[in-house]
Image (cartoon, grey):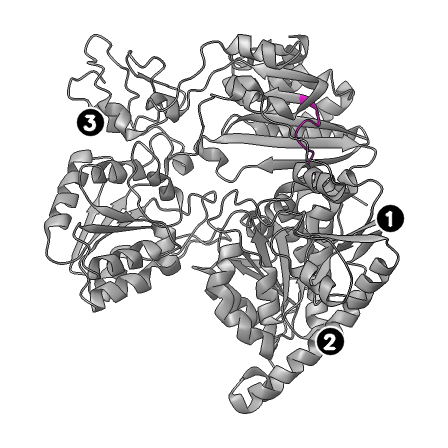
Amino acid sequence: MSTNVMLCGVGGQGILFAAKVMACAAELSGYEVTTNELHGMAQRGGSVTAQVRFGSKVHSPLFGEGDADVLCALEPVEGLRCAHWLRPGGHAAISLQRLIPVTVSTGRASYPSDLEDRLLRSFSSPKLLDCAGMASKLGDMRLANTVMVGALSSWLGLPMSSWRGAFERIVKSGLVEKNIAAFLAGQEA
Amino acid sequence: MERRLLSGNEALARGAWEGGVRVAFGYPGTPSTEILENLSKYGDVYCEWSPNEKVALEAAAGASIGGARSLVTMKLVGLNVAADPLMTLSYIGVVGGMVIVVADDPGQSSSQTEQDTRHYARLAKVPVLEPASAVECLEFVKRGFELSEEHGCPVILRTTTCVSHSRFLCSLGGRGIAKDANFERNPTRFCPLPIWGRKLRRDVEDRMVRQSLASDTSPLNKEYVRGTGLGIVTASVCGLHCLDVFPEASVLKLGWSWPFPDQLLKDFASRMDRVVVIEEGDPILEEHVKSLGIPCVGKEVVPRCGELTPMVLRGVKARLEGREPEVVAPVADAADLPGRPPMLCAGCPHRGIFYGLTKYDVVVTGDIGCYSLGVFPPLSRTDVLLCMGGGFTLAHGLSQAGEKRPVVGIVGDSTFFHSGITGLLNMVYNRGKAVLIVVDNRTTAMTGHQEHPGTGRTLMGEATSEASIEAIAAACGVKRIKVVNPYDLAAVDQVLKEALGADEMTLVISRAPCVLKERRLLGEKPVVDESKCKRCKACLKLGCPALELKDSAGCPSVNPALCVGCGMCVQTCKFGAL
């Protein structure tokens, strides 16, 4: 059996970094782990998703719709778009920072005004938080993805030593403590 | 042994390095690009971006004919360009191992076609290896060099987007010995003139028989025995999905999938009550299994198009069991969400040219690169996309055939060097009249900023000569060459007006570096003055993602997190509100 995590957001938000940190923490906890990412045109503002799987044995790097144990979204519309990936009883964390797509700015679509209602209808007790705002308070908006990793960490059952180890391995040494602070802020949210 | 989480592409680089690769060549293309980017970082393998895939494959052939191990990388459509040398190389063969990595893209996440590279392997009569994971990528590329040398022919290693971009924990080894080339003359082998070529042709057939026998017992093919009811014959990452989706079935996952391991297939099938062939792409394996007299199910229940994801395979399972496939659809609240298509970045220099073209009734033939995104509204200024270099040649043909509207052909800088030059030469030679534009952003942007002959830098980071588009065009005989700064919308309009009115061909070079690569502010970030804004939405016609309109009756606003201060929107506002 594996734990399946679905990450979604918009190109440039740091989804792939979040997936990497999670995978590294799982590896350091002694699990087999895989990741998969859809990033063909990711830097150009399109929707981006990534999957992380870990457990004592993992065959495929992909799981199916309705199979995610944990879902995290760095943008609320992207969270709704991917809501059906979460299994019944799964956990969701959604950042409320809104990124307006160009389809909306050019009048070809509208951005929903009742997002929180929709999120509460589509997920059972989701953790809604403002990762970008929390990261800004910590002094760097780019830490929003790390705040998110912290927010969902309690559902993954990995020890703090593995998370610390993951940051130490992945980010430049000068940024480790900042990332851990952002992680802890997310964990407490 | 050290283990590291590697993507398929990183593992291919690692495997090539461990396998003693001496030289590596390629042209960027998603999902293959990161292989050479990673291999070049080892520092002790000569790596290069070639101008196109044909050049890359030929250069690697030269190295391997001389006895050195070589790697070539490309995406699926790259093999179309490199097909010519591949066919003949199969006959004359190689001395040093040669692995041609071709990354297919089932589901077309970033490709114009969904072609199945196994067809090329059969056409060229060379073996194809299909790793399912990064672990196998590392192992298979090493084994590929050995097989290539054992059988004296190049080997195709086919990945897919999922294989190239999935990470697995891989065990690492040390650097393999990389031999230099030491060419030995043998014209009866290396010069396939008909007198010798006919013998080479027969040798290829004999070689395939030997390869089929070798594949029968190859450890690259893996059998997962879990029962004798349902037996699945499959290859690549589909095999891993099948292990999850069909927990009771036995799975024969082919890693050396062509020439087919006939005996292995027969043995496996003989132990199963029922056989199903599950392969992404065309029914190549299925048709062969049937030709061996093995009753099996295949494309009746397995889709031909798209990626075979776990969800799709659950549908296959349902159909096999006579059930309706379950559907896990998006939630009801997701039904009317705004789309988020990829788009030209805030501050992208290409925007100036496409915006300029919106003022004219022209037909625009485009090309493959970021500027393919010029097809989307509100710019909507690309009408046809065919292939690299096709932006120029399509324009020429359409214009010569009497199209009444002016025709504009667009290529990028990397595609100009890839295959735009011959089209340009042809147009000069044959007195064409279309307007040609090179949108030169000084890099291969779409695939993540790779160097090319015009950037003055090699993949290994060395300074080199910088090919000039103007000088090449002049040498081809182009008389009217205009260089324009695409951020200056008035200048763009002036150049386009003159070019479209001229009675001879014009080459416009729109030159400004990619903002995503430069990552610097181009100017002051504008702010919308709501008291001056007339809500005319003229600025929104640029389709800039930094210009947001949250309320359709309100003022647009500039998102400072995205804006790079390119100033194009300021030029579109007649009321000084920006």
For label 2, the crowd category at 10 Å Cα-Cα, with few meaning under 14, some 14 to 19 and many 20 or more, is few
Identified by mark 3, the residue type is Gln
Counting from the top left corner in percent of width and height, residue B410 is at 29, 50
Residue A5: give its label.
Answer: none
Q: CA distance from mark 2 to mark 1?
A: 31 Å
Question: Residue beneath label 3, please?
Answer: B571
Q: Between residues B494 and B179, which one lies in front from this camera angle?
A: B494
Asked if residue A84 can be seen in this view, the reply is yes
> Start and end of the magenta stretch?
A61-70
Upstream in sequence: badge 2 or badge 1: 2
Upstream in sequence: badge 3 or badge 2: 2
Counting from the top left corner in percent of width and height, residue A43 is at 47, 34
Counting from the top left corner in percent of width and height, residue A94 is at 59, 16
Q: Chain of mark 3?
A: B
Q: Quick one: SS at disc 2?
A: helix
Where B187 falls versus B229 (above or below)?
A: below
Question: Residue beneath label 1, please?
Answer: B229
Q: Quadrant of residue B86?
A: bottom right
Counting from the top left corner in percent of width and height, residue B408 is at 23, 50
Residue at 52 percent across and 45 percent down: it is: B108
Residue B209: give its label.
Answer: 2
Q: Are marks 3 and 2 on the same chain?
A: yes
Identified by mark 1, the residue type is Gly
Identified by mark 2, the residue type is Val
Q: CA distance from mark 3 to mark 2?
A: 68 Å
